[in-house]
Amino acid sequence: MVFDEIKTLLNSPVPLVSGKWNNISFDVPILVDINQPVTFTLKCIYFFEIICIIGAIFFMSYFTHFINSSSVFHKNLQYILVIEVVFFMFGEFSRFHLLLVQLKFIEDLDSPLFLISGIFRLEHFGMSLCGIPAIAIERSFATFYVHDYEAKNRYWIAIFSSSFILIPCVVLGTSNVSGQFIISLFDLILALYVMSTNNLADKIVIVDQTSTDPPEMGIAVVEVATKPFAGQKPGTSGLRKRVPEFQQQHYTENFIQATIDAGLGAKKRGSQLVVGGDGRFLSIEATNVIIKIAAANGLSRLIVGQNGFLSTPAVSNLIRKGHAGKIVDGGIILTASHNPGGPKGDFGIKFNCENGGPAPDHVTNSIYDITTKISKYSIARDLECDFTTVGTYEYDIDGVGHFTVDVIDSVTEYVNLMQSIFDFSKIKSLLSGDLSGGKKFRVLLDSMHGATGPYISTILADILGADSKDLLRTVPKPDFGGGHPDPNLTYAKALVDQLKNGEHDLGAAFDGDGDRNMILGRNGFFVTPSDSLAVIADNINSIPYFQSRKVEGFARSMPTAGAVDLVAKAKGLQVYETPTGWKYFGNLMDAGKIALCGEESFGTGSDHIREKDGVWALLAWLQILADKKQSVEEIVNNHWKKYGRNVFTRYDYENVDAAGANLLMTFLEAQLPALVGRDLSANGFTYKVAVADNFQYNDPVDGSVSTRQGLRIVFEDGSRLVFRLSGTGSAGATIRLYVDSYIPASDSQRLLQPAQDLLKPLVLIALETCKMEQFTNRKAPTVIT
């Protein structure tokens, strides 16, 4: 098998790697396509060649010493041999450098060192061919044309003969800088030589000098000088700022260049990326910038949603699915998630990696580091792509190569994925009333003018037969219709009020980019995100996708109530508590440790993609309802009677003065050690503190450690208080208070009481412990969930 792989390598055309330095573009021949993984066989080949190079350098050094110290060779012949040895050693050093590139020890290809290595690597071919004629010419002079040759140092002969080595080597090396070979006798001989040995000829472009037509030019690449902008540090979900900040000259371009450089690294050239967003204000302009910068940086292809539109789950699916039979290396998503849009609203850019999930910490840290040092970006300003129309658009980029933009339908692939996960025929029977004796099951869904609109319309109305009048605000708008696309009881109040009329069996709302969801039952019965995750986990076998897969475990973010922990314990499965941020779930999913996960911030998802998925969560509930043949409220109440109830709320204090917010967190953290073992009381209820700390997460997959992820106070009965300072908004600070009050299943008297009554004692304890009003001057939260 190893010999077959070596044989395949030898019979394949030698690939080229493109480099660029100081407005000079160049191609360098390498052994294997640098974008391919470094297999064990290749490592063996590389390390064997390194050993041979080292041996050759030592041998040639000794050979040079032997030539110069020996009286056997005439001085002219000594000079020629020494020149040839020196050029040979230059070639060997350049090959050693390229091997380090192949092994990915060196990742910077836009450097003068890489250019020099490329030049000397090519002159190595010329030297090998031209050295022998040079010696033959020198010997001809010695034998036939010059009398008394051995008695004198006839340097002009050495210079004349050596030119047969130097001139073609220089011509060959420097002509490659412009990407073309100058026709000459030596170039023609070289082309034939390489064709017979290395199969490099099919990569060589030979210009016919007899032609009077100018060479065809591609779209020019421009390097634009720029300066760093302060504060371009991505949060848990990318960079989010006000639209006017992104509209500053060079601001968006700087961040896109940094994102491509850090996100793709050494594999940038030839990469494929997915590009799309939730359609918010500035998306069209940003998509255009991404296309032009990607082309200038040597990416081979972009897969762009029509009009630059794709939901976040759809982007993750497209990355994982691959495109045109090739791996997709990541994606750029244009969204600020649940934050408001419009000319004065928020905009955001985030990078997803090749697994389809948000970039991990080391990538976002690298992006930020580049933004603090950036001095230029590359852009193909004259490239114009009509990404409003589905189709394939191809371009030749001057000095870079071929570039393709595939503009795709934004909905089709995601709908196909959902059809492979769920039993659409059974869900359709539920909605039509076939499962309940003729009474239709009515849904009321609010896309909030965000990204889920086209997906909900296609799946629920076109495929499953729901009444389109029950699908609200499905047309995406740049400003989300002037609303706040956050699916909670405050910003989706109109949906809640309409459900209270009792005409619909299930309600759901979705956020701006389609990854969050809120589930409600008849009469506006609210299902907390923590309960929603636990119910899906408990009924996971109702979903066809999981019936053929082994479920190893579940996960939740640390602030999320512990309802799913109880389900995992009952099923004998592992449960993981992670920091806030979907990227932590992605690591666990990639390792096969979890199948289902969720966050209290209305995010629920599974391992079908590496993002939370609002539409998926709705379909999961519909599948469970079709299987259980019970109402939403009945399913949740029965769940509480089996596992107990984690009564949960979140208080958001938005746009708080940053200084006051930081003082509050500092004050509270200082109190934590003294709280352990103490009893805290309010309204006649007492809770004993078992744990009080600043949460730290040790990743079981890669061993990374994430510290200072939120202050938590855990009580002996399982109830909890969590305090976090959020920085994902673009203005001010947000303090989030999470309250998780556990009511055991045995406490039937309190189990089904209203949530606000059950939560009140712990809420009072939390507000008094952190001195919320004193530090923030806020008597009430901005949002209560």
Image (cartoon, helix red, strand yellow):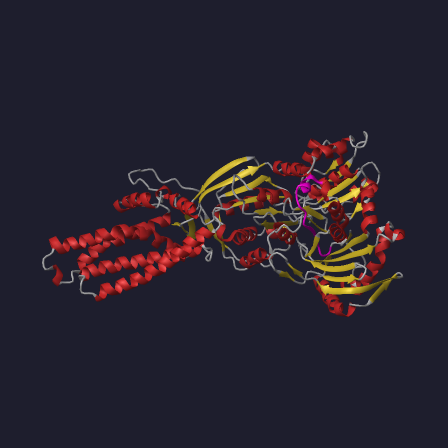
423 sits left or right of 224 in the view: right
38 sits left or right of 697 in the view: left
Tell me the quarter of the picture where residue 47 sits.
bottom left
Percent of width and height locating residue 555: 69, 52
Q: Residue at x 79, y 34 (%)?
A: 441
584 sits left or right of 34 in the view: right
Q: Residue at x 37, y 53 (%)?
A: 118
**Residue at the limit of the structure toward the bottom, as seen here:** 674
**Residue at the limit of the structure toward the left, as seen here:** 147
Near-viewer residue (404 or 712): 712
Percent of width and height locating residue 766: 80, 61
Tell me the quarter of the picture where residue 276 sits.
top right
Percent of width and height locating residue 768: 81, 64
Percent of width and height locating residue 295: 49, 45
Q: Residue at x 31, y 38 (%)?
A: 212
Tell me the quarter of the picture where residue 736 sits.
bottom right
Stretch in magenta: 543-559
In the rendered image, residue 557 lying in the magenta stretch gets the answer: yes
Near-viewer residue (230 or 715): 715
Can residue 246 be seen by looking at this rendering? yes
Can residue 109 be seen by looking at this rendering? no
In the rendered image, residue 670 lying in the magenta stretch gets the answer: no
